Amino acid sequence: MSDPTLERHFKGHRDTVTTVDFSSTMKQIATGSMDSCVMIWNMKPQMRAYRFDGHKDSVLCVQFSPSGHLVASASRDKTVRLWVPSMKADSTTFRAHTATVRSVNFSGDGQTLVTASDDKTIKLWTVHRQRFLFSLNQHINWVRCARFSPDDRLILSASDDKTIKLWDKNSRECIHSFYEHAGYATHVDFHPSGTCIAAASTDNSVKVWDIRSHKMLQHYEVHSGVVNSLSFHPSGNFLITASSDSTAKILDLVEGKLLYTLHGHQGPVTCVAFSRSGEYFSSGGSDEQVIVWKSNFDCSESTDSVRVQKKPASILKAAPAHSQANAAFNSRASTLCSQTGDLADGQDSQTAVPSHSGSHSRSTQSHSSSSTNVVQTHSLTQAHASDAGVPPGLASTLEHIIGQLDILTQTVSILEQRLTLTEDKLKECLENQLEIGLHLQRREEA
């Protein structure tokens, strides 16, 4: 299995990227942001991205329909919109809840939507004509997330009331409640087999439960910040997580261990998603960036269920920030460090185009970066030098090198920000100069 590599990065949002999803064809990526926009990015190089304006407040969730012909978006403005992901940006909107809508999810057959809201309810709707079907009402605080099971028979929901509830869609009854004691779940999802669920939590942990025995199978304490999002690989063997500690992490569910730590964002990583095939995954963050990675996983073997974690929770503590090399999770933990400073090349030139047929679509040029120039991978295949036969001096040197690379990354990022500020100031000066020149010319003519 090779290390993940950076494939593309996109800039165009003007605030934190809150949500990301791939189309089933892998031709497009949808994102939502605190800037109230939905953006559709085309994976084909040099193709423009579409910016959809319509929501009046932050977009908190987007998802492609299984066919890829529609994109659903949920917003703080209490509405859900269904968009056609093309230049025309045709959309229908409906007021789904009486408070912020935090989550929207298509059923596997693409016929039904489930939404979750700060009004403490979960609601189901038909996709065609957005007809209300019924609501689920047992949560006593904001509902952060709601998801259909792979067979569409069950619904999973997570709430600030510190419960994760499993519902039977047909009987509309709550089958079971899983309880979070330290924090609450920010994001939940079903394992592709439908037999397990995973929850990202504000207590910095990730938990995996069996929905048949209701027992916790795995508990990962690998992040040093709130875990904001997670996504299962379609094979069911891997789970990717996004955290406010500025990292995304890939967990090996078969071995029950941390596999990779991904450094690509400056600031919290807010969302993450695998593509439908698992060949790619994408992350978004408070740095307004969307990053696409190539997984490079060898998934010839697929597992139906997650193994019970044999290691005690204490082994799965996160490594200290200063020592990414000494990842004491297990003897084969690897760390992937991406040099984000190089991402600044050719960033963020936005071009507005006229709206088409009364729609709210603007086109934004997307930029890509070659993975060969941007990513350096450091696979430290043994965490303990004594186990691997690596001299302690060499292990120490590697730690020092990684520490220096982190410092370089931060320095390049700061320089990039300063350069951007200088360019903006220069542009402003030139515009002012031009304005003064025109003003003087008019006075002379008068």
Image (tube, rainbow, N blue to C red):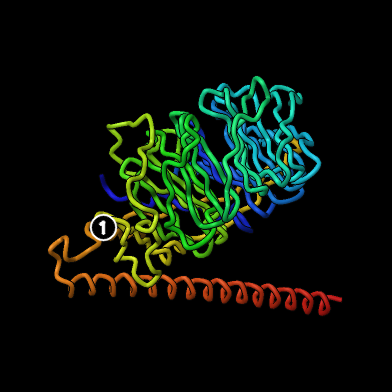
Above or below 161: residue 443: below
Instruction: Count all numbered tags in the image, as a single digit.
Output: 1
Where, quadrant-wise, is the C terminus in this rendering?
bottom right
Question: On the picture, is 259 further left or further right than 247?
Answer: left
Question: On the picture, is 319 further left or further right than 420?
Answer: left
**Residue at 45% across / 59% down in the picture?**
223
Instruction: Please indicate, yes or no, whether residue 152 appears anywhere in the rendered image.
Output: yes
Say what secondary structure mark 1 lies in.
loop
Above or below 132: residue 186: below
Instruction: Please indicate, yes or no, whether residue 26 appears anywhere in the rendered image.
Output: no
Tell me residue 144's x, y (percent). Answer: 65, 45
Quarter of the image holding residue 63? top right
Q: Nearer the viewer, residue 85 or 87?
A: 85
Tell me residue 84's x, y (percent). Answer: 64, 32
Q: Nearer the viewer, residue 89 or 302?
A: 302
Tell me residue 189's x, y (percent). Answer: 53, 38
**Residue at 68% across / 25% down in the picture?**
172
Above or below 347: residue 4: above
Amino acid type at image mark 1: Ser
Q: Nearer the viewer, residue 405 or 164?
A: 164
Tell me residue 264's x, y (percent). Answer: 44, 59
**Residue at 74% across / 23% down in the picture?**
133
As drawn, the residue found furthest toward the right would be: 446
Q: Nearer the viewer, residue 285 or 35?
A: 285
Q: Which residue does the numbered mark 1 point to in the structure image?
A: 379
Question: On the picture, is 408 further left or further right than 185?
Answer: left
**Residue at 49% across / 41% down in the picture?**
198
Residues packed near mark 1 inside 10 Å, few (<14), some (14 to 19) or many (20 plus): some
Where, quadrant-wise, is the N terminus in this rendering?
top left
